Image: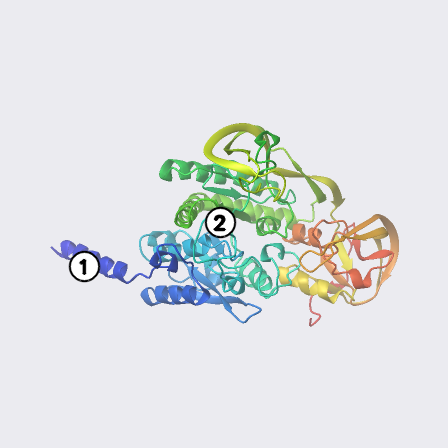
Amino acid sequence: MRLMLRIVLLFISGVAMASELPKTVAETTDYKSTSRYDDVISFVHAIQSIDPGIRVETFATTNEGRALPLVIVGPAGVVDPRTAHASGLPVVFIMANIHAGEVEGKEAAQMLLRDLVSSKRKLREKLVILIAPIYNADGNEKISTDHRKEQVGPVNGVGVRENGQGLDLNRDYMKLESPEARGLVHNVLDRWDPLVTVDLHTTDGSYHGYQLTYAPMLTPDADSALIEFERETLLPGIRARMKTRYGKETYYYGNFIDQLKPEKGWYTFDNRPRFGNNYAGLRNRFAILSEAYSYIDFRARVEVTQQFLDEILAAVSLHGQTMTKIAARADERAGSAKLKKLGARFEIKPWRKSTTILWERSTPAKAGEGIQNPETGSGPRIVRTGEIVPMKITDYGIFAPTEKSEVPFAYLIDARAKRVIENLRTHGIIVERLNAPSKLGVEQFVITKTEHVAREFQKHRELTLTGEWKSNDVSFDAGTYVVRMNQPLARLAFYLLEPRSDDGLFDWNFFDEILGDVAPVSRLMTVTPLNAGVGDGE
């Protein structure tokens, strides 16, 4: 009798909770509108009123003064990074709205939060889940029906790609010039150290047959065990479940180089760590980029994104122990000072020379008809047919180094490079200073050519240096900065400091004011005792 009464009471309690659960703006407007910043904050507060165990931190404040929420969901007792990692549970970080015109991730992240206090509460005993539902809050508030017109809904408009400074936040992971990126890297990725980062986007390219595409880390400089597990186990399993459980077609993100000639190949995007999925790889952690298909309707995009999140969490709860060990071993390998060479410049390569890709058959348009080619934005117009055709073509889905450089025992950095040091420390890289003048046998990069690109990008004219490393005995002043490479973030430090790196601090002009004939970063190649420490008060 008591058991029956308890079941009835639990049922009544569950019904009451369900009746109080908030809905997103997308749901309340029949998917005609998307949430504004205040709507998201109100939704989070409503969830907290239902479940006081949900915690919220501010991880950054935007250029226009909006506090960015990080919602923390886990078992009882997990209140901060220390208790999260003491729990032994995998930490999964889900971020949405980095591009505020790509809005279904923002809605799906709120729906997931609601599920975690209701139908999916059991996940909180297996994972610690961090949710940043509205990363580009400033861009989100510039909603207009003029934005992303090729995207199917919401009909009442979406925000813009850039933040309040006019920067693309998914190009700011290395240079960290936005308050959003600095807060994200320092307060979430470094402080909470999530095992997996999930970044929610929307496509804007080719016409294909996938409701959602995805990408792992694409930088070959990431630890090979991370890359192998994600490509061979984690993502294939998620793809299979998306098909069998929901009937949804998903595949690795890409575009046809020519919509009218798909046989030319399916191409992924970029290896550089200015993109979040690649950046996470250099931190020895897993990353999944999600791209809902722009040309299905808004409701369908929210649905497939929510399903994809569900399957990611299920997969991490299944494989979490293995993934944690892989990440820990990657930290050990990077911190052992045994990295030999890493790539500095790269080219795209075939991953699978013959694989089935779902192409939407497209034909050349007659004069005055059709739509613009989604790849080129110019040239011959095309006609979409709606027919999905499996095509056996080459998947250009990986990158390989065209140029490698040796990983030193330590880098020594000119004491004038204050902005560089601030950047490195924000990333979580350990930086020391020489306590006394030191004469050391080092390699210096002798510059033979400096070339800035003609066109400004993200308010920079990126720089390419040409030169060669030459050995010299050099006297360094006390106060010279030192970055030893026997630390877990050695791969990231290499990419930031190498003069030839395609996405480092030389590329982003951080050294321009102190550039001479010799780069202001030297490398110490052999294990050498150094009179240096971190206690410099900076």
Please, what is the three-letter code of the amino acid marked with disc 1?
Answer: Leu
- Near mark 2 (Cα within 10 A), the count class, few <14, some 14-19 or many ≥20, is many
Residue 249 is tagged as none
Asked whether, in this view, residue 372 is left or right of residue 103, the answer is right
Residue 9 is tagged as 1
Q: Of discs 1 and 2, which sits in the foreground?
A: 2
Q: What secondary structure is marked by label 1? A: helix
Looking at the image, which is closer to me, 173 or 296?
296
**Rendered view: 187 above or below 326:** below
Quadrant in the rendering for residue 418: bottom right
Please, what is the three-letter code of the amino acid marked with disc 2?
Answer: Gln
As measured in the structure, the alpha-carbon distance from the residue carrying label 1 to the one carrying label 2 is 46 Å
Looking at the image, which is closer to me, 425 or 87?
425
- What residue is shown with label 2? 151
- Asked whether residue 75 appears in the rendered view, the answer is no
Looking at the image, do the residues carrying marks 1 and 2 touch, with CB atoms under 8 Å apart?
A: no
Asked whether, in this view, residue 47 is left or right of residue 216, the answer is left
Image spot of residue 454 (x, y percent): 76, 53
**Rendered view: 380 above or below 42:** above
Image spot of residue 89 (x, y percent): 44, 53
- Near mark 1 (Cα within 10 A), the count class, few <14, some 14-19 or many ≥20, is few
Quadrant in the rendering for residue 6: bottom left
Image spot of residue 432 (x, y percent): 71, 63
Looking at the image, which is closer to me, 126 or 360?
360
Sequence-first disc among 1 and 2: 1
Q: How is the image coloured?
A: rainbow
